[in-house]
Image (tube, grey):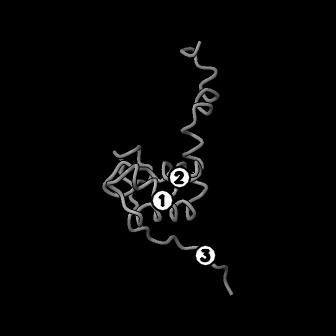
Amino acid sequence: MGVAVKKSKPHLYITRKKNVCGGDPVIEGTRVSVDLIVEMDRAGHSVDEIVAIYPHITHAQVYDALSYYYDHKEEIDKIIEENKEEYWIKKTAGETWRK
């Protein structure tokens, strides 16, 4: 018996485009990123609230973004970390322009 390989499942509403949000995964046809949806979820916003804030997206799209997150947790967590101000302060601490 071989080792089971986890296959990536398709996410119908999630896309990546080089020139949209730096190539990060977004809800197709929007600039609403998966990491934004995850951060709103973590902040306690319900799917209904997220759709009310962004009325051009649907409940299914939000749920697909959350599903994408759980299928690509490490990648999205890295994007979230790299978008924090503290990350960039630490990363650029030795740069001459910071002084």
Q: Tell which residue pokes out farthest to the top in this image.
A: 99
Q: Disc 3 versus disc 2: distance between alpha carbons?
A: 34 Å
Residue 38 placed where, x, y %? Answer: 53, 53
Proximity of marks 3 and 1: CB atoms separated by less than 8 Å: no
Mark 2 Cα-neighbour bin, 10 Å: few <14, some 14–19, many ≥20: some
Residue 58 placed where, x, y %? Answer: 37, 62
The residue tagged 2 is 45
Q: Earlier in the sequence, mark 3 or mark 1?
A: 3
Q: Secondary structure at mark 3?
A: loop
Proximity of marks 1 and 2: CB atoms separated by less than 8 Å: no
Which mark is drawn over residue 5? Answer: 3
In this orientation, which residue lies closer to the viewer: 20 or 3? 20
Q: Amino acid at mark 2?
A: His
Q: Amino acid at mark 1?
A: Val
Which mark is drawn over residue 99? Answer: none
Residue 62 placed where, x, y %? Answer: 44, 60
Q: Earlier in the sequence, mark 3 or mark 2?
A: 3
Tell us which disc is closer to us: 3 or 2. 2
The residue tagged 1 is 47
In this orientation, which residue lies closer to the viewer: 39 or 70? 39
Residue 90 placed where, x, y %? Answer: 64, 28
Q: Quadrant of residue 69?
A: bottom right
